[in-house]
Image (cartoon, rainbow, N blue to C red):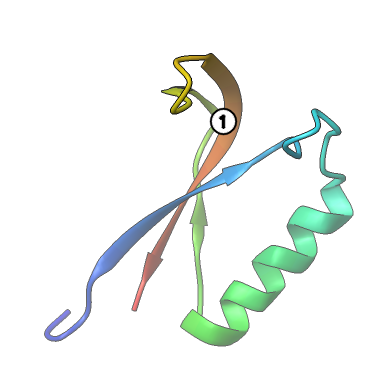
Amino acid sequence: MSGLALWEVLVPTVSNKGKPFRTRHHRAWDEQVRRIAGGLTVLSAARGQWLSPEGDLFSERMLPVRIVC
C-alpha cells in the first residue's frame, strides 16, 4: 500500500431534518465512490454523538465506510 492511505467516512442514514436516506441513495453513493477509488468497505451501522456549538446533544446512526486511496 505504498503511497496509499486508509480513510474512514461516516455516512449518515438520515438528513439534518431527520428524514431517512433511501437505500437507492446509498447505492448511488457507493457506485460513485467505486468509480473514484476503485472500491469501498461498508461496515455495520454505528451510533455517534456530537455536541452543537450551542451545547445540544445529537445522537445519530451512521454507516462507517472505509476507502483506500
Residue at image point 61% right, 85% down: 35
Q: Residue furthest left?
A: 2
Instruction: Look at label 1 and name its amino acid.
Output: Ala
Q: Quadrant of residue 21?
A: top right
**Mark 1 neighbour class, 10 Å CA radius: few under 14, some 14 to 19, many 20 or more:** some
Q: Nearer the viewer, residue 22 or 38?
A: 22
Q: Quadrant of the C terminus?
A: bottom left
Instruction: Please identify the quadrant where the N terminus is shown.
Output: bottom left
Relative to 44, residue 49 above or below: above
Q: Residue at 12%, 84% (x, y): give it.
A: 2
Q: Position of residue 13 (x, y in %)?
A: 70, 37
List the single residue furthest toward the front: 54
| Residue occupied by mark 1 | 45
Q: Is residue 10 above or below residue 57?
A: below
Q: Please, is residue 5 above or below residue 15 in the view?
A: below
Nearest the viewer among 52 and 44 is: 52
Q: How many marks?
A: 1
Q: Residue at x 58, y 34 (%)?
A: 62
Residue at image x 86%, y 33%? 19
Question: In x, y percent, where is residue 55?
Answer: 44, 15
Q: Residue 61: image x %, image y %?
A: 61, 26
Q: Position of residue 11 (x, y in %)?
A: 58, 47
**What element does badge 1 sit on?**
loop
Quick check: 60 left or right of 22?
Answer: left
